């Protein structure tokens, strides 16, 4: 990012800042999403509520909108301290965060949102090279969330494998690009914030995404068809990517408060993104006259056959492209964690407060915050 852009962001942040005399420290937080998206309306809104509670009033927040810091700017905004905590998508930077990207490469293999979020969180917290790459990058990790199962949102019916041939689809990362290419579609690496414009202008024919995007990004106005397929879910998130400079300046008690607040908000966010919002989006689609298609058994079988190869592919990609020698073992570990947390999620009926408590008890309660992230 150019220095002039950094200066502009800094000025914007200062204009938005407000005094909070009752709090010792006000952190600049950036959801990098519009208010309608759960990353803003739930994830960061709830975090802003939980943080003063968990810190006994010592910590507060100032939220910066996506017009100040968007997803593509997040790395530079955090490094420059324009934002101190931000919604960060590691798949935007796979070469710099290869271990986290390894778990992201497994996105097509997951199906339960709360289980995927919990597995991702435990995987990252307990993985030493994962933590080292975060430290080298200048950031601290405070947990993940996950979407619902992805579908095909398109401007024409996709009823069979053959209908995918030549279809131009926005892809949120390498796993979906592989899926598209395997079936003859053309993946396009487009920011989710640009999906509406890209579809409305005919640049792409649709998107492989959560049905929640129909209301998060107004795709309900440009999409004509939704095909329900088991296309995994988005799990490679770092919901509260925290500047290492900011983290180092916090007391032990405030670091612990940050982790507790983030953990609660992560589960709320996953419930909203992975359960309630998709239900609302489906209702909005029906009201708008969008055609909703259940994929045929043959279509689903073809997709599942491809997905069955993804764990091996993820290990190969991570070993060959990023030099992770124990990639196969890392993949196996993530799958083990996902299986465990899938059982927990079923046990508690995916209830967010119960999931947050279990993740805290089994992951964050075991962290030494005097050394974590440093």
Image (cartoon, rainbow, N blue to C red):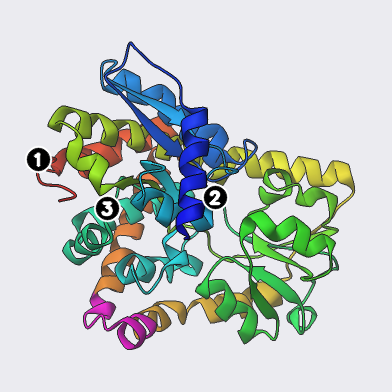
Residue 226 appears left or right of 58: right
Q: Which numbered disc, 3 or 2, marks the residue closer to the eye?
A: 2
Is residue 233 placed above or below 82 in the rendered structure?
below
Residue lying at 80% horizontally and 47% vertically, measured from the top left: 285
Disc 2: which residue:
70
Q: Are marks 3 and 2 in contact (CB under 8 Å)?
A: no
Query: In front: 156, or 87?
Result: 87
Q: Position of residue 51 (x, y in %)?
A: 34, 25
Q: Is residue 28 magenta?
A: no
Q: In the figure, residue 267 lies in which quadrant?
A: top left
Q: Position of residue 54 (x, y in %)?
A: 28, 22
Q: Are marks 3 and 1 in contact (CB under 8 Å)?
A: no
Query: In front: 261, or 147?
Result: 261
Which residues are the magenta region? 317-329
Disc 3: which residue:
122
Q: Which numbered disc, 3 or 1, marks the residue closer to the eye?
A: 1
Looking at marks 3 and 2 on the same chain, the residue that comes earlier in the sequence is marked by 2
């Amino acid at each position: 990012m150019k220095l002039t852009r950094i200066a502009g962001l800094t000025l914007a942040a200062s204009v938005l800042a407000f005094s909070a005399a009752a709090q010792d420290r006000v952190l600049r937080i950036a959801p990098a999403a519009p208010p309608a998206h759960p990353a803003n309306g739930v994830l960061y809104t709830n975090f802003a509520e939980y943080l003063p509670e968990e810190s006994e009033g010592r910590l507060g927040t100032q939220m910066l909108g996506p017009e100040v810091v968007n997803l593509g700017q997040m790395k530079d905004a955090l490094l420059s301290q324009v934002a101190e905590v931000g919604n960060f998508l590691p798949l935007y930077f796979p070469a710099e965060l290869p271990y986290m990207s390894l778990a992201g490469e497994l996105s097509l293999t997951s199906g339960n949102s709360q289980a995927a979020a919990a597995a991702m969180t435990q995987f990252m917290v307990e993985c030493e090279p994962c933590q080292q790459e975060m430290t080298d990058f200048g950031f601290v990790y405070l947990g993940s969330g996950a979407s619902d199962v992805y579908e095909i949102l398109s401007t024409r019916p996709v009823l069979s494998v053959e209908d995918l041939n030549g279809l131009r689809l926005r892809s949120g990362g390498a796993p979906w690009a592989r899926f598209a290419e395997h079936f003859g579609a053309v993946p396009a690496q487009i920011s989710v914030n640009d999906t509406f414009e890209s579809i409305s202008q005919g640049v792409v024919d649709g998107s492989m995404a959560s049905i929640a995007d129909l209301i998060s990004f107004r795709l309900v106005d440009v999409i004509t068809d939704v095909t329900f397929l088991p296309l995994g879910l988005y799990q490679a998130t770092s919901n509260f990517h925290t500047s290492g400079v900011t983290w180092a300046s916090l007391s032990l008690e405030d670091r612990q408060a940050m982790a507790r607040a983030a953990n609660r908000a992560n589960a709320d966010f996953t419930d909203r993104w992975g359960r309630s919002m998709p239900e609302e989006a489906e209702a909005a689609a029906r009201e708008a006259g969008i055609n909703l298609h259940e994929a045929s058994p043959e279509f689903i079988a073809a997709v599942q056959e491809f997905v069955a190869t993804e764990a091996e592919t993820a290990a190969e990609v991570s070993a060959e492209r990023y030099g992770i020698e124990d990639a196969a073992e890392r993949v196996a570990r993530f799958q083990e964690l996902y299986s465990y947390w899938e059982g927990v999620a079923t046990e508690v009926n995916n209830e967010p407060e119960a999931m947050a408590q279990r993740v805290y008890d089994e992951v964050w309660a075991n962290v030494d915050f005097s050394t974590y992230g440093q």
